[in-house]
Image: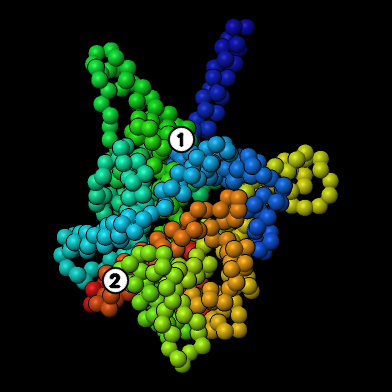
Amino acid sequence: MAQPAKVAGATFCVMVFIRFILKLYVGRGKRKQTTVLSTTSSCHAILNGNYASATGAALLHARAGPNQRLRRCFGVNNAFTSSDETLHTGFKDSATKMIRLNFQQWLEIRDAARSSIIQELDLQRQHQGCHKQPIPIIPLMQGLTLGPVLHLIRWQYPNQTKGVTTSVTVLHSLAEAINQSWMMSKVENVPFVEAMLSRWRLRQYMLKALPPHRKKVPFCSGIFGKLVHTLSYYQTLRWLVVGGQPGADYADMENPINYILPAYETTWRVALLCLVEIRERSRYGCGVQRKDVWIKLLRGFLESPTKSQLCKRAECSLDTDQPAETAEMIAKEALRLYPPTRRVYRDFDAGPTTDKGSGPWVGSAKISLAADVEACQRNNISFTNSKDPVGLQGFWPARWAHIPGRVERNEFLAFGATPLQCPARAGFGYSMIALLVAVVLEAFDDEWDFIATVDEMKDVRSPEAPLRTGRSDYKGFAFVHK
């Protein structure tokens, strides 16, 4: 009788072990079905919580649910991944303060961006020995975007981070680490071990890009010293496992990736596609008559990155009835056509599963909804009129001269909607996009050719339709010296 008991006990232990391994390496469950809506009213209802009468903590909880994938793969703990109202308020206040820049700070960001491109060109010459080798545009724009973001964090936490210039090599490595973690976060049911390794890799590059001031603890010797180091390693291990704070790396400071991720991910792709629209696609459509004007506006802002310059109208010739654009309109049009977040997801509580009636949430304890911001803004007739020579699917900054302020406030959703609207809408977002595009236009002038694959060039030469916005699209875009 003892033998069957031993077998049963051994079998139970094996089953427990197998279950543990499956939890580590295999995902759990399936993603619930998501209902995608794209009208302006439905997108607003999803973004502001009216679809499920969600307010306050309930609305934060609805936003945090779909973003837990970011917590798993990045270790972030910010307003996007937490339903804590105090954390949300603190994060928003800190982010708002971080992006409120004075003129001198904008000049520093501009000069750093210029320096970054010079480093990029020098690095290319060292590795390839000549000007004729192509410079891929996607890594260029990703590194160029990360630089200003790191500046913002250094200014916000001057006593916790070292004020050193980050090399383009480190920027590229950090960007690639973010890209890998981002792609992993899109995979259903990411294995626990892979997510933890993703956070570890990201942490290593983050420490290189943003070196912290490590505070020396007095009398750290003997048993006490070993205890301090053990606690530091424990804190770091805890961050790798559950996310949140990065352990003892940055004393009295939030995890920098909490700010890096939203700023970087909402900027680099928009700036890239805006650059291609202005520099290349304008050769093949109605933009040919305005290309020089657009470039002049952006360069004017680059020389004087102020709010007044951002909103300064271009000079119009007497033989056209088109309104004068501004650099802000250029950035705004890029954000309309290529919103930073194509779809915004919310997981609302749907109440008891015995609810009767109709609607996509009936019969489920949770309802997953997505606001298709991209489709909404590309099909909203409020954003066009009879004077626009291109349709809603085309890039035409001048359309914003005809759009009433009321329509823009209520129907332009690139920065989300109240009460969770991004603070960058106040001006920082437009300024950063305009500056990044202008820096690249300045560096890669007519002495450089734009190259791409055959299929990619077909898209470039068809300005009546938007460019693709997938993360793996247009890897063949590059500049090559003539």
Whether residue 222 is visible here, answered yes or no, is yes
Amino acid found under the numbered disc labelled 1: Gly
C-alpha distance separating marks 2 and 1: 40 Å
Identify residue type, mark 2: Glu
Position of residue 388 relative to residue 224, above or below, is below
Q: Position of residue 173 (x, y in %)?
A: 31, 50
Secondary structure beneath dot 1 equals loop
Marks 2 & 1, CB-CB < 8 Å contact: no
Occupied quadrant, residue 61: top right
Along the line of sight, the residue nearer the viewer: 408 or 132: 408
Say which quarter of the image contains residue 448: bottom left
Q: Is residue 297 above or below residue 84?
A: below
Q: How far across and down, in percent of the image, does residue 329 sit?
A: 47, 71
Location of the C terminus by quadrant is: bottom left
- Left or right: residue 84 versus residue 439 is right
What residue is shown with label 2?
A: 442
Looking at the image, residue 89 sits to the left or right of residue 439; the answer is: right
Secondary structure beneath dot 2 equals helix
| Residue receiving disc 1 | 244
Using the rendered image of the protein, determine whether residue 180 is visible from the camera's viewpoint.
no
Q: Residue at x 54, y 61 (%)?
A: 414
